[in-house]
Image: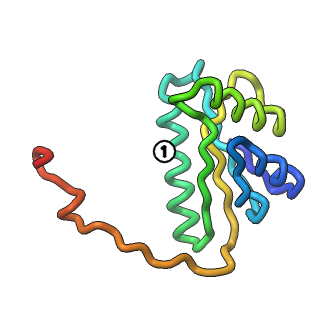
C-alpha cells in the first residue's frame, strides 16, 4: 500500500485511465498493491484490506471513493492503468496495482441509502 497526500501526485493519479476526477478533491489516496509472486490470492488480499479501510473510514465519517485499476476482463486496459500508476509513484515491477481509494472529508453528508432487507439478501442452508 502507498499513502499519497501530495496534491500534485493526487492530480497525477486523477488521470489514471479511465480517469478518477474525484481524486483532485481528495485529501489523500491509498494505492492498493499486491505481489502475485508472494501470494496467488493478491487480489482477494487487496480487496479485503481495502474493505477494512473503507469501513474504518466510514466509522470516522471520512468519505471514500474507490477507483479500480486492475481490470480482470481486459488485460490491455489493466496494463495501461497499472502503468500510469506505476510510473507516477515509482512502483516496483513485482507489484500489481489493484485500486486507489480516495479519502477526504465531504462537504455534504451523503444521502441515506435504502438498503435491502435481510430477508432479501440472506438465505439459509440453500439459495431458495
Q: Residue farthest to the bottom?
A: 108
Residue 74, picture quadrant: top right
Task: Please determine whether, in this image, residue 32 is positioned above or below residue 95.
Answer: below
Measured from the top left, where is residue 50 in percent x and y? 55, 49
Front residue of this view, candidates 34 and 10: 10
The residue depicted at 71 percent of the width and 60 percent of the height is 22
Q: Secondary structure at mark 1?
A: helix
Q: Residue farthest to the top?
A: 37
The residue depicted at 63 percent of the width and 81 percent of the height is 108
Instruction: Determine whether, in the image, residue 87 is placed left or right of residue 112.
Output: right
Q: Which residue is mark 1?
A: 48
The residue depicted at 54 percent of the width and 67 percent of the height is 58
The residue depicted at 48 percent of the width and 28 percent of the height is 41
Measured from the top left, where is residue 97 in percent x and y? 65, 34
Indicate the colouring scheme.
rainbow
The N terminus: image quadrant: top right
Measured from the top left, where is residue 120 in percent x and y? 21, 61
Task: Please determine whether, in this image, residue 114 is positioned above or below residue 57.
Answer: below
Instruction: Determine whether, in the image, residue 73 is placed left or right of residue 1.
Output: left
Measured from the top left, where is residue 75 in percent x and y? 59, 24
Amino acid at each position: 500500500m502507498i499513502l499519497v497526500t501530495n496534491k500534485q501526485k493526487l492530480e497525477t493519479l486523477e488521470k489514471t485511465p479511465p480517469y478518477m476526477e474525484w481524486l483532485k478533491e481528495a485529501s489523500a489516496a491509498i494505492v492498493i498493491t499486491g505481489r502475485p509472486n508472494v501470494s496467488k490470492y493478491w487480489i482477494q488480499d487487496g480487496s479485503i484490506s481495502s474493505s477494512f479501510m473503507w469501513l474504518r473510514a466510514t466509522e470516522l465519517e471520512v468519505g471514500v471513493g474507490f477507483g479500480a485499476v486492475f481490470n480482470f476482463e481486459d488485460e490491455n486496459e489493466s496494463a495501461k492503468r497499472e502503468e500510469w500508476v506505476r510510473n507516477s509513484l515509482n512502483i516496483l515491477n513485482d507489484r500489481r496495482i489493484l485500486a486507489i481509494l480516495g479519502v477526504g472529508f465531504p462537504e455534504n453528508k451523503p444521502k441515506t441509502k435504502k438498503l435491502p432487507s435481510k430477508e432479501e439478501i440472506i438465505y439459509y442452508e440453500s439459495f431458495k
